[in-house]
Amino acid sequence: MADGVSGAEGVAGLDFASVTPEEFAKIVKGLSGKEITEIAQDAELRARVLQEVFGRMGRQFKPEAAGTLKALIRWKVTGTDEAVETVYETDISEGTCTVREGRSDAEPRVTLVMADAEFLKLVSGNANPVTMFMMRKLKVAGDVALAAGLTRYFDIPKA
């Protein structure tokens, strides 16, 4: 069903509830940087995609891997223009993962900053976070060791 989806129009027509994480990873892998930019420039579509991705984080969380970890992770997705920065927070505590949109007053243990294309590639398993960091496509403030190991706390699909 998700096969053959391309560009902003194809993504806009998706019923995200029926797309598996693996299908989403394949879709992202098939998108060019230009197509991801088109998605990011459509405010409504961008919001839908980000809400779906962050909404799935709690379901893809692996509590057994997190153990007793207690950490607030702030995600800043910068978009195509700094003015459209979107912030989400992932709060990992006592084997649970709570995701919320917006910035709280709490101090995050780590903040991750990246553009839409890098974010989608990262969360769909289509990019290596260490490589992204080294190429300055992912900025990390705070606990770099935590940031480096974040992927082990989530079931990230492979495209």
Image (tube, grey):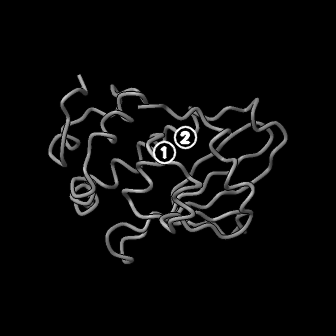
- Compute the Cα span from label 1 to label 2: 9 Å
Q: Local crowd at mark 2 within 10 Å, few (<14), some, or many (≥20)? A: some
Q: Nearer the viewer, residue 52 or 21?
A: 21
Determine whether 15 is above or below 91 in the image: above
Q: Which residue is mark 2?
A: 57
Q: Residue at x 85, y 41 (%)?
A: 68
Q: Residue at x 31, y 69 (%)?
A: 80
The quarter of the picture where residue 95 lies is top right
Q: Which residue is mark 1?
A: 123
Classify the position of the N terminus by image quarter.
Answer: top left
Q: Is residue 10 left or right of residue 19?
A: left
Determine whether 66 is above or below 148 in the image: above
The amino acid type of the residue labelled 2 equals Met
Q: Please, what secondary structure does the residue beneath circle 2 have?
A: helix
Q: Residue at x 58, y 48 (%)?
A: 99
Residue 32 at x, y percent in the picture: 25, 50
Q: Is residue 16 left or right of residue 135?
A: left
Q: Residue furthest top?
A: 1
The amino acid type of the residue labelled 1 equals Val
Q: Residue furthest left?
A: 9
Q: Select label 1 or label 2 by which is in front.
A: 1
Classify the position of the C terminus by image quarter.
Answer: top left
The quarter of the picture where residue 41 lies is bottom left
Contact (CB < 8 A) between labels 1 and 2? yes
Determine whether 154 is above or below 32 in the image: above
Residue 92 at x, y percent in the picture: 71, 47
